Amino acid sequence: MKLSPNCVYIARHPVTGNEAPFEEYQQLAHKALDSLDLDLPSTGDICLKPNATVLYEPAKRIIVHPGFLAGMIESLTGRGIDPARLIVGDGQSAESPDKGHTWKLAGYTDAIGDRGAILMPYNNAPVRDVVVDGGVVYDRYPIYTAVTDSSFFFNIPLAKCHNLGCTTLSIKNLMGILGRPERHLCSTQEVDEPVGAEALMRLGDSGYSVFEERFYHKLCDLLVALRSLEIPRLTVVDGLIGRDGTAFNEGDNHPLGWSLVGVDEVSVDTVGTWLMGLDPLETPYLQFAAERKLGTIRIEEIDVVDIATGDKLSASELEQIRRSEPLIPLSRASNGYYARFRDDGSAVPWRIDEVNEQRAKDGLEPVPFDLVPSSHLVAD
């Protein structure tokens, strides 16, 4: 099947529980890629960038499952690609053997090595400065040369929620291609300090804090930087089993049963967010991407094509795949955790305690929010 850059493609694999074996992820990856005409280059490294932020065991659904990567590698080598050209890497929190966070425990060492591909943790790899044309917060970004010098870039997120990003799909997954310290977009950075600590916690015109607004602009700046490289690229989402909560320990896993494939990151994230049961039009980083004209976030404007049949899915067919109970992102508050989305679908600002503390100093009413029941949280 020839890929259209204006479409998002969906592959489906039945799943019922909140866990699945290695082979099920492997099969989903094959379903996502095997029938697609990828027009891969005959030379040069092919970069596979999974979400591998903290190296937890794969069943927790905090990182892309090694079985999904194994299936992707098999699909690519099955086309005659030399596995030594396949470089799997991420810039992340690195190994912490005392906490059990290792590439081996995450399943990457065996899944990648056994198939002849190369595992390259990016943390100490060289970077190249990439200009951000029209950047709002950053005018340039240091991006690992493993990405900038590749001949093809696979962006491989998993479908999960995040306390700040709300959904962490293809755009947020790009944070791992940044060198340090710029990579730590979720923190107050040197570039934010001139704004001032108090100003960062005041609400901007969007209804989110200035800190939060800047974070979303940073993500958009990063997407602009990646696109400027003009490297052939494709997002392939590991969505067999998704995760709600904070993106880390606090949350639960839920069966989704799909993979999304697409060139346009905003379209992929719009469809993924919608299928997770959330409203893209109310999802903060997507709002900013749309305002900056980086892509549409209206689900009705995106053609979603079933890879198995080649047919465009109707609105009713898409509705059948969508979660009826949304995967809700959670963020920490002083007395527990709160949902980032209200019952009406609107978003609650991040770091709500600090936002409301600043509002109290400014003589303003607090932003209302509700704590979630502790029974929803799984912390270990």
Image (tube, helix red, strand yellow):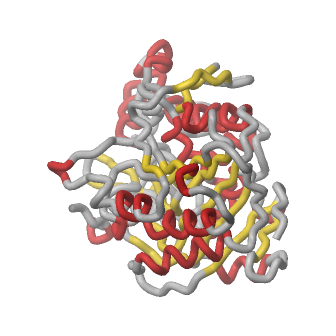
Compared across the picture, whether 74 is left or right of 20 comes to right
In the displayed structure image, the side of residue 333 where residue 120 appears, left or right: right
Residue at x-position 46% and y-position 58%: 329
Left or right, residue 187 beside residue 146 = left
Whether 230 is drawn above or below 76: the answer is: above
Given residues 40 and 278, the one toward you in this image is 40
Q: In which quarter of the image is the C terminus?
A: bottom left
Name the residue located 59 percent from the left edge and 38 percent from the top edge: 147
Figure check: 265 above or below 205: below
Q: How many labels does the image show?
A: 0
Is residue 292 rendered to the left or right of residue 76? Answer: right
Between residue 303 and residue 152, name the one nearer to us: 152
Q: In this view, does 344 lie above or below 208?
A: below
How far across and how far down the image is residue 335, in percent?
25, 51
- Horizontal and vertical percent position of residue 197: 40, 21
Task: Choose between 166 and 124: the one closer to the eye.
Answer: 124
How far from the left and from the top, in percent, is residue 261? 68, 63
Name the residue at the top extreme: 194
The location of residue 319, given as percent across then percent down, is 70, 78
Q: Can residue 48 be seen in this view?
A: no
Q: Residue at x 53, y 51 (%)?
A: 84
- The quadrant in which the N terminus is found is bottom right
**Residue in the image at 35% along x and 57% along y:** 109
> Does residue 324 appear in the picture of this structure?
yes
Location of residue 327 with respect to 137 vertically, above or below: below
